[in-house]
Image: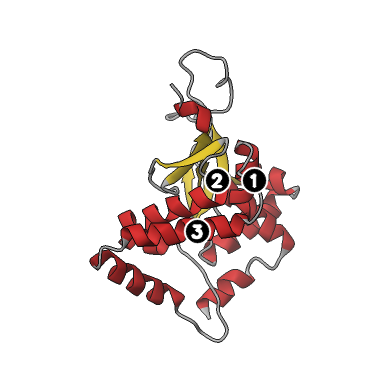
Amino acid sequence: MEHIDAIAALQDPVRRRLYEYVAAQGREVGRNEAAEAAGVARTLAAHHLDRLAEAGLLESGSRRLTGRSGPGAGRPAKVYTRARAEWAVSLPARDYRTAAELLAEAAEQAGLDAGLCAAARRRGEALRGSAAPCGGLEEAMEVLAARGYEPHLEGAEGAEGTAGAAAPVVRMRNCPFHAVAERFPPLVCGMNLALLEGLLGADGPVRARMDARPGECCVVVESSKNNQD
């Protein structure tokens, strides 16, 4: 019932807009910013943000948004981030997570990494179907967003033609396999990489590679030409 209650909290359209905005930022969001993004008054936004925190969908804290400290810095403001907890509802009850963890444990103990990656790459290719490999980072982001990865572009401003500037990469705030990846990181992250190689196309204008960072997917996507000598 707890999971149902949490997800039911998103039924209100304003509450859902606020949740989606906070979740998409990947950082702390204040009430004023959230209210402006959702197009509602600050008091209404505060009410819904607090309800989302009570439901376990957001985490709340406080900090000075001015970045200053000491006298005259102002009172700390309430801020919100997406909660790390996962919520899922299945009626009747199903427990696919336990099955996935047991299968991952057996595959790891049996040394089936290569076979799992081969199967994941074939699945990615099957999901792509007859479509050509992704033509660029924008197209890759659309594909990744449709699969729930929550992609965002990093290092895009001033990257091209700027000496020493980092080339843009697509990072992902969500790993659809997070719960199992936490317990079996080499196995599941390798599977995830192979799946995305098949989905995006291994020989096209973009490529997926490992670049793990706390709180995000272990895979990033970049232009293939970034690695040409």
Q: Mark 3 = which residue?
A: 122
| Frontmost residue, 38 versus 147 | 147
| Frontmost residue, 147 versus 84 | 147
Q: For the C terminus, which image quadrant? A: top left
Disc nearer the start of the sequence (1/2) = 1
Q: Is residue 154 above or below residue 22?
A: above
Residue at the far left in the pictured view: 109
The residue positioned 24% from the left and 67% from the top of the image is: 109
Q: Mark 1 = which residue?
A: 132
Q: CA distance from mark 2 to mark 3?
A: 11 Å
Look at the image and name its color scheme.
secondary structure
Residue at the far bottom in the pictured view: 92
Residue 50's x, y, as percent?
58, 59
Q: Is residue 187 above or below residue 9?
A: above
Snapshot quadrant of residue 46: bottom right
SS label for mark 2:
loop
Say whether marks 1 and 2 touch (CB < 8 Å): yes
Q: Mark 2 = which residue?
A: 201
**Number of residues whose C-alpha sits closer than 10 Å to that of mark 3, classed few (under 14), some (14–19) or many (20 or more):** some
